[in-house]
Image: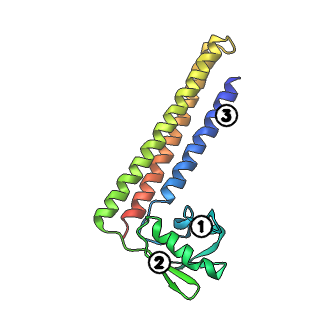
């Protein structure tokens, strides 16, 4: 392993942490409907747990309402039950073979809870980034111990890894500010 490998591995792992945070933040409800809200819901499809998006078409009817159209007519009640049981606070209603899913407006208290959740997710991501930095620094120390690089090279690489860490932490902070704004906007 070389310094270049350590830096590349660190960058890849930090990008994955950011991607995970983005995915987690997308699940935080903002009072507005978006088709990704139902992505993680599993439906019993002929005895197999299947993602809702694999058995139905999810569309945006308006700013606060989703439309879910199962591809098979007999799946309508199953999909409706899965949405109701998903513990998202959603109450779907069926109109023919279209399931309408209105998203209730968030109360001020609930918005504050959501902001706390967003900050908690961000802190977890920052911890992950710091752990990756620690692993990288340990990898650099091992290179010195194995006499595969000089101390000057190691110090320079540590500085670069710290700059990388700072860049990703700043990106996390920006994502949090954006999401907070989205959650608090009525």
Q: In this rendered view, identify the residue nearer to me: 80 or 48.
A: 48
Nearer mark to the viewer, of 3 and 1: 1
Alpha carbon separation for disc pair 3 and 1? 42 Å
Please give the name of the residue rendered at 56% of the width and 74% of the height, measured from the top-left corner: 78
The answer to whether 25 is drawn above or below residue 85 in the figure is above
For label 2, the crowd category at 10 Å Cα-Cα, with few meaning under 14, some 14 to 19 and many 20 or more, is many
Please give the name of the residue rendered at 40% of the width and 61% of the height, measured from the top-left corner: 181
Please give the name of the residue rendered at 51% of the width and 37% of the height, measured from the top-left corner: 129
Label of residue 165 in the image: none
Q: For mark 2, give the secondary structure.
A: loop
For marks 1 and 2 on the same chain, the one whose residue lies earlier in the sequence = 1
Label of residue 92 in the image: 2
Q: Is there any visible trace of residue 63 in the rendered image? A: no
Label 2 close to label 3 by CB (< 8 Å): no
Quarter occupied by the N terminus: top right
Residue corresponding to mark 1 = 44
Label of residue 8 in the image: 3
For marks 2 and 3 on the same chain, the one whose residue lies earlier in the sequence = 3
Q: Which residue lies furthest to the left in this view?
A: 109
For marks 3 and 1 on the same chain, the one whose residue lies earlier in the sequence = 3
Q: Is there any visible trace of residue 105 in the rendered image? A: yes
Residue 17, how many percent across, how many down? 55, 43
Nearer mark to the viewer, of 2 and 3: 2
Residue 143, how many percent across, how many down? 65, 17
Label 1 close to label 2 by CB (< 8 Å): no
């Amino acid at each position: 392993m070389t310094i270049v490998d350590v830096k590349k591995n660190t960058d890849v792992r930090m990008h994955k942490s950011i991607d995970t945070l983005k995915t987690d933040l997308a699940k935080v409800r903002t009072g507005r409907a978006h088709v990704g809200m139902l992505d993680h819901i599993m439906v019993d499809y002929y005895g197999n747990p299947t993602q809702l998006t694999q058995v139905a078409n999810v569309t945006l009817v308006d700013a606060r309402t989703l439309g879910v159209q199962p591809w098979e007519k007999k799946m309508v009640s199953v999909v409706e039950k899965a949405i109701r049981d998903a513990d998202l606070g959603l109450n779907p209603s069926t109109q023919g073979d279209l399931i309408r899913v209105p998203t209730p407006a968030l109360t001020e208290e609930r918005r504050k809870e959501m902001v706390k959740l967003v900050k908690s997710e961000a802190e977890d991501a920052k911890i992950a980034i710091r752990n990756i930095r620690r692993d990288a620094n340990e990898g650099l120390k091992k290179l010195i111990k194995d006499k595969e690089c000089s101390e000057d090279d190691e110090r320079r690489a540590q500085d670069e890894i710290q700059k990388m860490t700072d860049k990703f932490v700043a990106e996390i902070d920006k994502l949090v500010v954006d999401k907070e704004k989205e959650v608090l906007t009525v």
